Image (cartoon, rainbow, N blue to C red):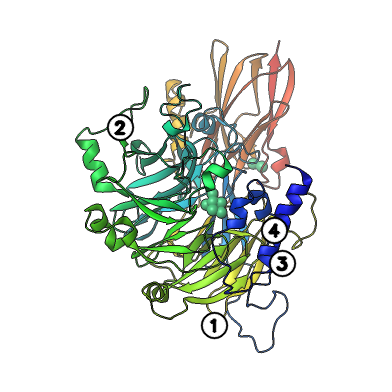
Amino acid sequence: MSNDRKTQILDALESEHRDAPENSARRGFLSAAAALIGGGAMAWGMTGCEGGTTTSAPTGATPAHEPEGQSIHVGPGKLDDYYGFWSGGQSGEIRILGIPSMRELKRIPVFNRESATGWGRDDWSKELLKGTSSGDTHHVHLSYKDGTYDGRYIFVNDKAQARLARVRCSTMEVDAIVDLPNSQGTHGIFPQRHKTGYVFCNAEFRIPMPNDGRDLNDPSKYGAMHTAVDGESMEVKWQVLVEGNMDLCATDYEGKYSFATCYNSEGGVTLEGMMAADQDWLYVFNLAACEAAVAAGETITVGKGKVPVIDGRAGDSAVVLRIPVPKSPHGVNVSPDGKYAVVAGKLSPTCSVIDISRIADAFAGKIKPRDCVVAEPELGLGPLHTAFDGKGNGYTSIFIDSVMTKWNIDKAIRQFAGEDVDPIIEKVDVHYQVGHTNASMSETKDADGKWLVALCKFSKDRFLNVGPLRPENDQLIDMTMDKLKVVHDGPAYSEPHDCVIVKRDLINPLKVMDRKDPRHEYCQAIAAKDGVDLLTTNKVVREGRKVRVYITSIAPAFGLSDFEVRSGDEVQVFVTNLDNVEDLSHGFCMVNHDVNMLVNAQGTNSITFTAGSPGVYWYYCPWFCHALHLEMRGRMLVKA
Ligand code: K7E
Ligand code: CUA
């Protein structure tokens, strides 16, 4: 695109933004953006940062007589009220924050390779990762029971490699990763909310089925999979093949339906193509019908795949319903009372409110799918995601306007029915270009309306300049006052997409590892073949060119102060931490061998490497564990 053309597009978008006062009549579809193909996506990142559409006071300037609100100050030694679970985007990880302090408490490596813990380098994680070292986590959700979190598991997607990972809340470590067949760009995921049943995963990118070189350039034959993974066994149970793409995912509270937004019902493979239609869909999957089809064998297989696939491409059926919504929708969020699915319009300034109780009639053909829509309030330019306070209000992130719009669901429904009411309660500036939003317990029936987070994609000038790559800005908003108030800027490394905020008493991790940990079991199973009990044995076992070294550790010493191998041996070191002391981690680093791993209290870990050229190599404990931590080391003696 020429520079002139770029300037023209940017000017158009910028003036569209500047000239659009609140409640202006110019809230049509983003027709300018749609017409100015090629500039749209870029311009989204470059406009709309000047405020001007909002009612709140600029942050930093505290008006007189302002109510106090909740404190975000969590004093030294005090604990936060909530756990925040953040996806880490391209970092491939999950992060745990304390809310309201926004202090980062932990990073859970998932799809990435991580130096501190050895994730992606130790044997157990390498087996789970199958040689990959990158990922793109967008959506993190916890397992449920009866509509609220049960504190057992965290699920997270990998958009880059079409995978779903599970973290055990007991240890805050990944215990399973499953590949999703026939999928690319796995994006929205959501677990069922009545129990740990399925976790649904949406493929965002349409591909040939099977993707084996056929139909390469015939997009009309492409499709996308809505995949049901068993959240307990982490096995793929079945898939539904649809013709459009799928973006965000949600489930109802009763276990009847799953939802997927489709922004490319057109089946386009270019920007123009994907933005062509003024209406796309919310796919609704009828889960009982899906299970019945699978049980009756009314399925196909794709290529050599073993997973039963329900072909849902032929239009509305007992299995899948398409509810028309404007235009290239993004987020879908279900209200805490379980009644409504709120679909954010993205290229339409609206959210579509779907009455879930009507869906059965639509499946039965008694009403049209579109009749499930009971409200469509205009909330601002570029609505993306909606959070809830449990008091009947929605809080929708508005990307282009850089605001959060608070609106009342009932009033929106009444307005849609013709009544002269304004559902919009308030808009608050956020900085800048907000993507996801979530509120404390918002994705559960126990939404409590305390804290709202706006995950802004751009921080621009909000922090010290750290070079071309700036942090995102996760802003914390107090929801408890008459007006929403931004109370904290939270710089975040690339790039949290989504988060959930969970009451702290629902999460009860272990203080030290237990020996039922799958990683310990994995190591003990190998050791058992050598007749070794990891808890009691320090020993070197040779089998040809393979050497297994079993080492215990108690601060400040390893159970072996040296071991001998030959250059070129494949060496597998097991370290079992016998310290039963909270927060007392050891580790194992073999110098000059790219070997480093964490071993938590009462945990075991193993790592495999090739012994280098002859010489002495020190191994040491990298975690400061004792006054004599520096002395916690030993020698690997490598013979020729
Ligand atoms: Cu960034 Cu949920 Cu991947 Cu919206 S998604 S912003
Ligand atoms: Cu063990 Cu440092």
Q: Nearer the viewer, mark 1 or mark 4?
A: 4
Q: Residue at x 22, y 32 (%)?
A: 297
Which amino acid, mark 2? Answer: Pro
Earlier in the chain: of badge 3 and badge 1, it is 3
Q: CA distance from mark 2 to mark 1?
A: 52 Å
Q: Is residue 334 above or below residue 512?
A: below
Earlier in the chain: of badge 1 and badge 4, it is 4
Residue that mark 2 sits on: 308
Residue 12 — which label?
4
Residue 482 — which label?
1
Q: Is residue 235 above or below residue 380?
A: above
Earlier in the chain: of badge 2 and badge 4, it is 4
Q: Dot 4: what SS?
A: helix
In the rendered image, residue 46, in percent from the top left (x then y), is placed at 71, 55
Residue 330 — which label?
none
Residue that mark 3 sits on: 50
Can the viewer see residue 434?
Answer: yes
In the rendered image, residue 78, in percent from the top left (x then y), is placed at 59, 68
Within 8 Å: ligand 1 and the Cβ of disc 2? no
